[in-house]
Amino acid sequence: MAKESSFDIVSTVDLQEVDNAYQQAARELTQRYDLKQTGASIDFSKKDETFLISAPSEFVCGQVSDVLNSKLAKRGIDLKALRWDDPQPAAGASVRQSARLVQGIDKDTAKKIAKDIRDLKLKCKAAVEGDKLRVSSASRDTLQQVIAELKERDYGQPLQFVNYR
């Protein structure tokens, strides 16, 4: 009997890198001439894994989110890992917008990925294990084909392929 090879499909974000990007974005808000005196602010809650942008207008809110997105991208964080809510009116004419980080693969997405793997008609098994998927096969070439196919598809969140053995 041949030894089974496997890998895990996960969706994780390095919170330290996210915190570093947040610190850089907050520093840029205080230094950029067009955002300095606007009263715009950005907050990050590590516990809840959420961002909260407060700004005097939707335009300034968009500018702040662009700054944050650029800092996240420079730090290697996939922007698909953020789920932005619609801007909400706040006190006065100000606006608030929140975003949360996506950690783990939810059940619906995991089922869709497993179905897509089955539809490839390759000799491999995909099993949902909590917030990750384990794909196993006797052939390492088959596993590499599965990884290549999944990289081409968009599931609305970043996927990483780990524990390849």
Image (cartoon, rainbow, N blue to C red):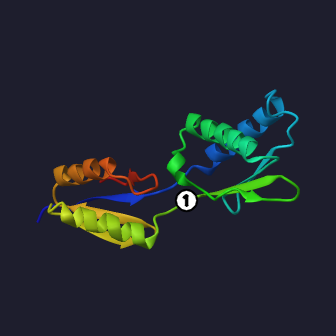
Disc 1: CA contacts within 10 A as few (<14), some (14-19) or many (>=20): some
Q: Please state which of residues 13 and 165 is positioned toward the viewer in this rendering.
A: 13
Q: Residue at x 21, y 50 (%)?
A: 145
Above or below 102: residue 14: above
In this picture, is 97 found above or below 25? below
- Report the front residue among 129 and 49: 49
81 vs 118, left or right, is right
Q: Residue furthest top?
A: 33
Quick one: which residue is furthest to the left in this view?
1
Q: Residue at x 46, y 55 (%)?
A: 157
- Residue 53 at x, y percent in the picture: 75, 50
- Determine the residue positioned at 83% across, 34% down: 30
> Based on the displayed image, in which of its 4 quarters is residue 97 positioned?
bottom right
Q: Amino acid at mark 1?
A: Val
Q: Is residue 129 above or below residue 31?
A: below
Viewer-proximal residue among 30 and 14: 30
Count of number-bearing discs: 1
The residue lying furthest to the front in this view is 93
Q: Dividing the image into 4 quarters, which one contains the N terminus?
A: bottom left
Place residue 121 in its image quadrant. bottom left
Q: Is residue 155 left or right of 52 when viewed as pictured?
A: left
Q: Quadrant of the C terminus?
A: bottom left
Residue 48: image x %, image y %?
A: 69, 63
Check disc 1 and report the residue beneath it: 102
Q: Is residue 45 visible to the viewer in this orientation of the structure?
A: no
Residue 124 in picture, x, y percent from top left: 19, 64
The image shows residue 162 at horizontal and vertical percentages of 39, 53
| Whether residue 133 can be seen here | yes
Residue shown at the point (71%, 62%) measured from the top left: 47
Q: Secondary structure at mark 1?
A: loop
